[in-house]
């Protein structure tokens, strides 16, 4: 099996610890501080400066995690939509200042949606329309900045929902993200397909993957090897369907990054 290069999703405070590993391999990196509203706008400046200083010599593929707390992409209230767009624009400004070329967004699809969206013929189309009302100006700005927006599964039970949503924008700058632990939770707790099915469903639209292990019950963010995900099946699917996707370990404890990486290396999956 082809070995895939693995990087990490980290807070700025953790960059120094992993800097040499990231820079020596020019590994994929996602900076996560900007998911928080406390780190957007004027508050972003010091974090951006610190990240740039630590990452001198880094030329790998850089992304950020966009904001998501209290920020639904599927907005019914136009006043709320304005706030969501403001936060997304602030995050895109951060990405541009950092030279990041990806930004992670959270899926609007819930388990409730899986069981109820098809109760009539208009609900799915209406939901996609609301997401377009929210994201269309954000997508336009992302295209200007050269930042690809990737939509991450959260509660998604149907692996195709995000793919259909991303494709509806008809833009190379809206694609799909996969969180392996979220998918494994959905598989174990809600009867969704296994993680590798999410990879194949997205195919070459899959541009980004959060690698984390879990037990199929909750969102654990454990290092690979600590949970029950079938990593051989997942990496085989990635190699076959989405080898260009950015792979980053997104772990609850950043001190586990190297042990998680080494576990994947020992399995013959990562380098």
Image (cartoon, rainbow, N blue to C red):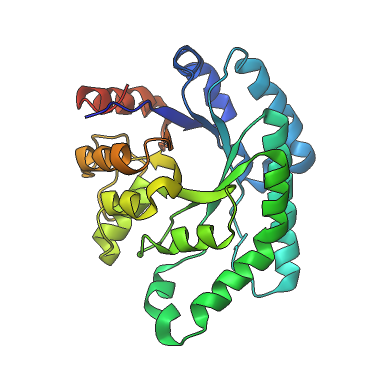
Q: Is residue 45 left or right of residue 265?
A: right
Q: Residue at x 62, y 71 (%)?
A: 130
Q: Position of residue 224 (x, y in %)?
A: 28, 35
Say if residue 120 shows up in the picture.
Answer: yes
The one of 33 and 163 positioned closer to us in this rendering = 163
Q: Is residue 194 left or right of residue 125?
A: left
Q: Residue at x 56, y 37 (%)?
A: 32
Q: Position of residue 143 (x, y in %)?
A: 68, 45
Say if residue 218 shows up in the picture.
Answer: no
201 relative to 109, above or below: above
243 relative to 25, above or below: below
Q: Position of residue 6 (x, y in %)?
A: 38, 27
Residue at the limit of the structure toward the bottom, as seen here: 120
Looking at the rendered structure, the number of numbered marks drawn on it comes to 0
171 relative to 228, above or below: below
Q: Residue at x 44, y 16 (%)?
A: 25
Q: Position of residue 9 (x, y in %)?
A: 48, 33
The one of 117 and 225 positioned closer to us in this rendering = 117
165 relative to 215, above or below: below
Quadrant in the picture for the C terminus: top left
Q: Is residue 158 left or right of residue 51?
A: left
Q: Residue at x 43, y 27 (%)?
A: 7
Quadrant in the picture for the N terminus: top left
Residue at the limit of the structure toward the right, as seen here: 42
């Amino acid at each position: 099996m082809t070995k895939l290069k693995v990087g990490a999703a980290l807070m700025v405070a953790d960059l120094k610890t992993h800097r040499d590993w990231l820079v020596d391999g020019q590994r994929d990196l996602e900076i996560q501080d900007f998911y928080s509203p406390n780190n957007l706008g004027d508050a972003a400046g010091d974090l951006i400066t610190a990240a740039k200083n630590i990452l001198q010599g880094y030329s790998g593929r850089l992304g950020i995690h966009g904001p998501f707390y209290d920020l639904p992409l599927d907005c019914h209230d136009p006043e709320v939509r304005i706030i969501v767009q403001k936060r997304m624009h602030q995050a895109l400004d951060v990405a541009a200042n950092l030279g990041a070329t990806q930004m992670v967004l959270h899926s609007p699809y819930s388990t409730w949606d899986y069981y109820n969206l098809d109760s009539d013929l208009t609900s799915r189309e209406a939901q996609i329309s609301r997401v377009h009302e929210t994201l269309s100006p954000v997508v336009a700005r992302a295209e200007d900045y050269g930042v690809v927006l990737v939509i991450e599964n959260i509660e998604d039970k149907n692996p195709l929902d995000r793919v259909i949503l991303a494709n509806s924008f008809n833009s190379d700058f809206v694609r799909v993200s996969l969180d392996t632990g979220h998918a494994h939770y959905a598989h174990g707790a809600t009867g969704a397909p296994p993680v590798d099915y999410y990879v194949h469903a997205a195919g070459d639209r899959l541009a980004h993957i959060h690698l984390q292990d879990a037990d199929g019950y909750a969102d654990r963010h454990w290092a690979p090897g600590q949970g029950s995900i079938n990593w051989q099946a997942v990496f085989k699917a990635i190699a076959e369907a989405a080898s260009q996707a950015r792979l980053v370990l997104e772990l609850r404890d950043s001190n586990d990054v190297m042990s998680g990486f080494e576990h994947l290396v020992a399995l013959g999956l990562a380098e």
